[in-house]
Image (cartoon, grey):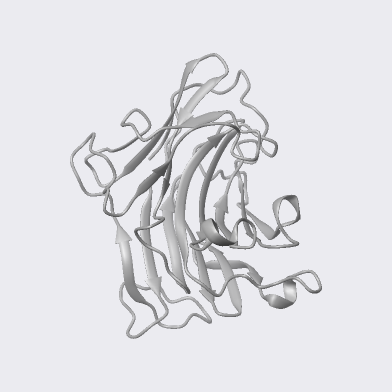
Amino acid sequence: MTRAILFLLFAAALGTPQTARVVSGSPPWTLAWSDDFDGPAGAAPDPAKWAFDTGGGGWGNQELETYTDTRDNSYLDGKGNLVIEVRQPAPGQYTSARLKTEGKFAIAYGRIEARIKLPAGQGIWPAFWMLGADMPKAGWPRSGEIDIMENIGREPSMVHGTVHGPDYSGAHGIGQSYSLTGGARFADDYHIFAVEWLPKSIRFLVDDRVYFTVTPQSLPQGASWVFGHPFFLLLNVAVGGSWPGNPDATVTFPQKCW
C-alpha cells in the first residue's frame, strides 16, 4: 500500500510575510488561503473549499479511472490528512477522486505549495496543478494550465513541472523534471512541491530548490503568455493513460494517497 500526506498552503505576494520560508529571489508572502484538512475521520473535504470533478471517459488522456465524490475515494483521516483512495472494483475498472477549488477559490500570483508523500506504482498518476478560472469561457489551453507537480509510477524518483497554453499544450508543454539522487523515491518521504508565480515568471520548486523557471521568452515564437489572471487548484490521482501507461501485475489496490 502506498500513501501520501498532503498539506496545502496558498500565499499571495503581498504585504508582510506569514509562515513563509526564505527562498532566494522570493518576494514577501502573505497567507491568502490554506487547508490543513482538520476534521473527523471519514468526513468529506470542506465543501466550502473543495468541489469535485466526476465521471470517466478518459479525461482527454485515455485514462482508466472514474472519478467520484463519495467517501469511498476521498475522506479525512482524522489526523489532519486528506486521503484520496484509488480502488479497483473489478478487473480493468478503477475509481478515484479529483478535487478542485473552482468557483470557491482562485488566485493570480503567489506561492502555491503542498507537502506530499507520493504513491508509487506503474500506471498511478498523482498531480497537483492549476487551471485558468476563465476556462469555461476561454477553453483549454487558452485559459492556461500550471502543473505544479506530476509523477508517473514508472518514475518513482522523478517529478515534472509544466505550463500549457495555446501553441504549447499537451506533449508540447513547456516544462522540466526534477529527480532525487541516490536511489531515493518520492514515496519514501515527504516533499514540498511549489510554484512561485509572478506576472512574468513562474518558478518551480521541490523542497525550496528552484529547478525550473519559465518566462514569456521561454515560449514558442508568437505564443501567448496566458498566466496573467486567476487560476484555481486541482488535486487528483489518475490511473493509466497515454503518458503513464496502464497498471500492471505489480500494482495492488486500493492505492491510498494521504
Task: Answer whether residue 52 is visible to the viewer in this image.
Answer: yes
Question: Considering the image in quadrants, where does the C terminus appear?
Answer: top left
Where is residue 64 shown, x and y percent of the image?
Answer: 58, 28
Where is residue 104 shown, x and y percent of the image?
Answer: 34, 58
Residue 94 vertical placement versus 200 (above, below): above
Q: Residue at x 48, y 76 (%)?
A: 23
Where is residue 115 shown, x and y percent of the image?
Answer: 41, 54
**Residue 26 horizontal side relative to residue 241, left or right:** left
Occupied quadrant, residue 62: top right
Residue 51 vertical placement versus 26 (above, below): above
Q: Residue at x 70, y 51 (%)?
A: 170
**Residue 128 horizontal side relative to residue 163, left or right:** left
Where is residue 124 shown, x and y percent of the image?
Answer: 56, 34
Q: Residue at x 66, y 71 (%)?
A: 214
Q: Nearer the viewer, residue 194 or 62?
A: 62
- Residue farthest toward the top in the current orientation of the protein: 91
Number of numbered labels in the structure image: 0
Residue 196 vertical placement versus 81 (above, below): below
Occupied quadrant, residue 44: top left
